[in-house]
Amino acid sequence: MKKLFALCFVVLLTLGAYSQEKTPPQYLLFEFMRVKADQGSNYWQVEEFWSGIHKQRVADKSIIGWDLWSLTPSGTEQGSQYLTVTIFTSLKDMLQAIGSLDVMAYAKKAYPKMTDKEFTDMYDKTGKSRDMAHQVLFKIVDGTKGDFTMKVGTMITMDIMKQLDDSYEKVESEIFKPWHQQMVDGGKKGSWELLQAILPAGSESYGTHITVSMYKDATQLAAFMEESFGDMDLATQLAVKEGLKTRDWKEVKIGKLEMMVR
């Protein structure tokens, strides 16, 4: 049972808190990128270019921030190698950005000395360097409290969940979140959050939620994953057993923060 207890909570690790302020960001746009092995250098140049555009978007208050995460495992047959996350204050802002973002206007503000040909060349490189495999819109529905501040090098775990019962979010908040809060308070992780997918949606969607945890570095993450969590009393055992029935755990990824714009 000790091993089951440890496994249950390692499964629930995830990409945690983008902010620990009283009014955290509410909406996140995840874009999963597939990058071929021979395009790694070009992709890095592309994201550095786009980070300048995102800085301008932050300055114009159209977004709160933008992050680039490298993902593990990252084999060519294991899905996406990178994830970008754009943070919005409202669903309206996120939908407007997806539908009508004037990229060229922001690019010219960010890079006033670049020529039209240079912009065209960079857009061509963008298309060739990566495939945007998945785009998912999320709403933050719950999370731990604390003062953790992420920085380049921060590590995350990200667990994709498929809700099987309407009580799933309640189970996360009432059974599992208090445990995550203890870990945050004890300095064993930085934060935890529960994200609800807005789109895609429906019975054919891959997942409905992501639970996320954040760690200051690989050392803290490894220590957490290797820790023995001790025995549970009978009531906790039963609660965890029933709670796990409310979701289908699809997969887990580990990420490292490579770039961030605020």
Image (cartoon, helix red, strand yellow):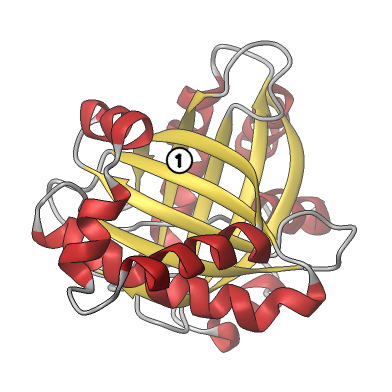
Quarter of the figure with residue 65: bottom left
Instruction: Give the image location of residue 248, x and y in percent.
Output: 75, 30
Q: Secondary structure at mark 1?
A: strand
Using the image as rendered, state which of residue 243 and residue 164 is in the foreground.
164
Disc 1 packing (10 Å; few <14; some 14–19; many ≥20)? many
Task: Judge left or right: residue 110 versus residue 33.
Answer: left
Disc 1 residue type (three-letter): Leu
Instruction: Give the image location of residue 152, x and y in percent.
Output: 41, 82
Q: Is residue 71 above or below residue 160?
A: below
Using the image as rendered, state which of residue 161 and residue 255 is in the foreground.
255
Provide the residue designation for mark 1: 194
Residue at x-position 68% and y-position 22%:
205
Instruction: Give the image location of residue 75, x and y in percent.
Output: 85, 68
Quarter of the figure with residue 206: top right
Instruction: Give the image location of residue 131, x and y in percent.
Output: 67, 53
Q: Is residue 94 visible?
A: yes
Task: Judge left or right: residue 145 versus residue 3.
Answer: left
Residue at x-position 55% and y-position 39%:
135
Quarter of the figure with residue 125: bottom right
